[in-house]
Amino acid sequence: MKKGKKEKGGIFQRLRRGLARTQGLLVGGADDLLRPGRGLDEGLYEELEEVLIVADVGVEATTRLIEGVRREVKKKGITDASEVLPLLRQEVLEILQPYEAPLAIERTGDYPFVVMVIGVNGTGKTTTIGKLAHRFGSQRKRVVVAAADTFRAAAIEQLEIWSDRAGAHFVRHGSGADPSAVAFDAVKTAQAKKYDLVFIDTAGRLHTKENLMEELKKVKRIIGRELPGAPHEILLVLDATTGQNAIAQARTFHEALEVTGIALTKLDGTAKGGIIVAIAQELGVPLQFVGVGEGVEDLQDFRAESFVDALFSQTT
Amino acid sequence: MFETLTERLDHVFKKLKGRGKLSEKDIKDALREVRLALLEADVNYKVVKDFITGVEEKATGQEVTASLIPAQQVIKIVHEELISLMGGGEDNSLKLSGSPPSSIMVVGLQGSGKTTTAGKLASYLREKNRNPYLVPADPYRPAAIEQLRKLGETLGIDCYAPQKNDDPVQIVAKALKLARSQNFDALIFDTAGRLHIDEELMEELLGIKKVLNPSEILLVADAMTGQDAVNVAKGFNDVVGITGVILTKMDGDARGGAALSIKAVTQKPIKFIGTGEKLDAWESFHPDRMASRILGMGDVLSLIEKAQSAFDERQAEALEKKLRKDEFTLEDFRDQLRQIKKMGPLEDILGMIPGLGKLKGIKNMRPDEKQLVRLDAMVSSMTAKERRNPRIINGSRRLRIAKGSGTTVQDVNRLLKQFAMTKKMIKQVSKRGGKGISPAMFPL
């Protein structure tokens, strides 16, 4: 991949680089927020609100956050505007930090650790699996990748390329095959040949499609029947570009399947994925990964500090 | 789409409707709610600001002459502003000009749905008696070329096969040459997904544009996009100059504020919407319908259009007569069921009915398509006499009907009970002169 090789660096640098480029596009004079000597006026809170809304934090969570800041300001007797933003930053950090939880692959005896990957169309499920397979492959884990997206044209081929790249064992059936059968097959194979990990790719589906959600439940059920305790992780892939609908997605997928982790992709653009703040507050699902590019290395553990820094980076 | 915004505005305007006259403060209150609703619908912060200012100015301006504005007037202004912001009255048809073949470039972020859209577009053009040719210009994403090839195969539309190691500019140049030597007249170039801030790849897009001199450069955008929609749209528009927008994934429950945002920053028409993964899930964009939907007036026009294509007018007339005379039978009911099935997925139809989204419980209600089949089977298992006069259906008849239709006696009981209730309801409605109610909606 051409772009994967282009730039490396920590997530923070990558995030900032993306965000720095968007400064010119952002509305409002956020710099003003930090100017020492500025008093506390209504305009200040409006600007804070704008920063959060523009980051897709959402009206409700934003209102709650601003109210919290107002309380703190009062309590601490703050009179200078430059002290307000750090308060807000701290508040967001406190929401996210408890859910900062990198994926921990626990030894499960002879059994493989099974990760089922789900999400709506186009969030980057297949790419994320490719990166995951690469990551654990390079940690000398023996990995199986299962193509349970049998619906979308060439989804199997796409995953196969990623799987080969990562040196994983690839399990596939034909296009249009039953996704549960593919998952079953993958788990069986992994059990028989003592693989460490199984990643199951599923077809993208809008959370509003009842029958397709049922299909996912079935995949989960079949895996669990074959291997008690599996799938050990259900990873929901969310696109950072998505607005408020991401809450509905997370909520519905969680209700149906009990999501155990979230990967937030496409953070290398100008979108900030602020919706994750509202999702953490409402659902309390562990935040595991962030995707920051198309290369195999461009998947990082979620770090609340870096994320919050990037969220407010136009003002720091 | 837009459901919650609809509910919100409904709520706002209910407050307005509650009083006869409005003060300047009333307008401000209403617009504050409108603002929140728009933000929740993912309309960009600044776009919302402009919108609210525009509406306020119009409303206040009218106040000078009337001093007090009826609630309807505010609704009308908000509605009109929404329509005009989304391109009402504009020509948003596809422009394939110049000497054939015309080229269309499909551009956008990763995962927005470009490849599927390219397939749908090709299918649409063929319907319009064009001879389309698909060109996959994405050698980066694994199997992207294969994906378009397969879509082409499914549709029976030719797809260019790029040579290995050709870069996108080489691919499009060769494909263009090949297409010219054959009689293709509409070429669709599916480009790789890219970030609007990726200078190298945006440069490449410009290179492709120079080779093709395309009639259309269509930005494919996900209807679920948040605040960033303005940055993305502006980024693509500034560099390559888009000519139109296609909104995808409109079949979800995203409120779709991105439509307003993108239109506002690019001033380019939204031409089509994608409404599903199937290759025929594709519609023209109608700003007025969308605005009506936002305002809780439901997507009435779409519903009417669908109903018109499914319902036989003479049948409808006959039905209405029967309704008035209270002669509605189970046979008529079965006809209705069948017509409803012709209109497409029930969920879609429900979404189009004004105000239905407001009703508690309806939101979580998933109409069961199979239920329609079961109802049909039960009615079909009755004798003609039973259908005309359900009162004669006793226990043993019920058992026979249940067996014949593969259902249970309880199912049959429920059907008969609901039918009786519906008849009663129809009677009441038609007494009040209610017209056009569809009795077949009752099993829901």
Image (spheres, coloured by chain):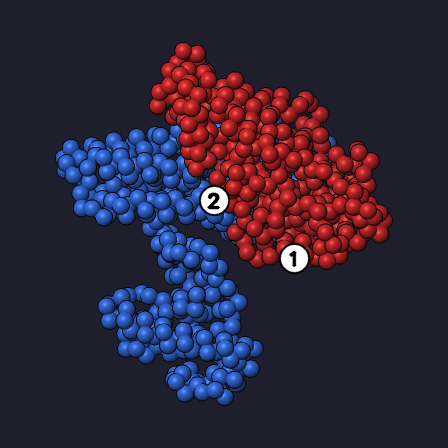
Element on which disc 1 rests = helix
Amino acid beneath label 1: Lys
Q: Label 1 marks which chain's residue?
A: A
Q: Residue at x 46, y 29 (%)?
A: A52
Q: Which residue is mark 1?
A: A218
Considering depth in this image, is B15 or B232 the residue closer to the camera? B15
On the same chain: label 1 and label 2? no
Q: Secondary structure at mark 2?
A: loop
Specify the subunit that label 2 lies on. B
Residue B31: give x, y in percent of width and height. 30, 36
Say what amino acid the circle numbered 2 marks: Ala
Query: Residue B163, relative to residue B439: is it above or below?
Result: above
Task: Report the front residue among A153 and B92.
Answer: A153
Q: Colour of chain B?
A: blue
- The residue depicted at 33 percent of the width and 50 percent of the height is B297
Would you say residue A6 is visible in this rendering? yes
Mark 1, other Cα within 10 Å: few <14 / some 14–19 / many ≥20: some
Residue B392 lies in quadrant: bottom left
Write the residue at 42% across / 27% down: A71
On the image, the x and y values in percent for residue B114 come to 57, 40
The nearer-to-camera label among 1 and 2 is 1
Chain A: colour as depicted: red
What is the x, y in percent for residue A57? 48, 33
What residue does disc 2 label? B254
Tell me if B402 is positioned left or right of A28 in this view. Answer: right
Label number found at residue B14: none
